[in-house]
Amino acid sequence: MKTRGVFHQPSGRFKASLRVNGKDIYLGQYACEELACQAYDRFAIKVHGVDGDHRLNFGIVWYKEDIPLIEKVTLFSR
């Protein structure tokens, strides 16, 4: 499966990250590729919005029920 923002690590886990304003944002490591793809997609929706032109791994329809919760999440920086 060709994925966006998900990379298979030598440990066997899958790392998710998204580039925002020229910076790679680390989203975590996951036991399976599907969970890493979901983390990437949810963060992309939060950053770029529901109507953003950012491509997702599973498509916006996959997350219709999650969108109200995704929009409530507050992003912070250190």
Image (spheres, helix red, strand yellow):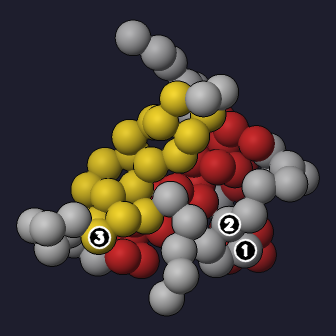
Between marks 2 and 3, how big is the CA–CA gap? 18 Å
Amino acid residing under circle 3: His
Q: Is residue 33 above or below residue 49?
A: below
Q: Point out residue 63 in the picture as x, y percentages from the top left corner.
A: 67, 67
Position of residue 33 in the picture relative to residue 59 (left or right):
left
SS type, badge 1: loop
Determine whether label 2 and label 3 are within 8 Å by CB: no
| Residue that label 2 marks | 56
- Residue at the spot 60% in from the left edge and 29% down from the top edge: 22
Most extreme residue toward the left, as rendered?
A: 11
The disc at residue 74 is none
| Residue that label 1 marks | 59
Determine whether label 1 and label 2 are within 8 Å by CB: yes
Residue 31 visible, this orientation: yes
| Residue that label 3 marks | 8
Amino acid residing under circle 2: Leu
Foreground mark, 1 or 3? Answer: 3
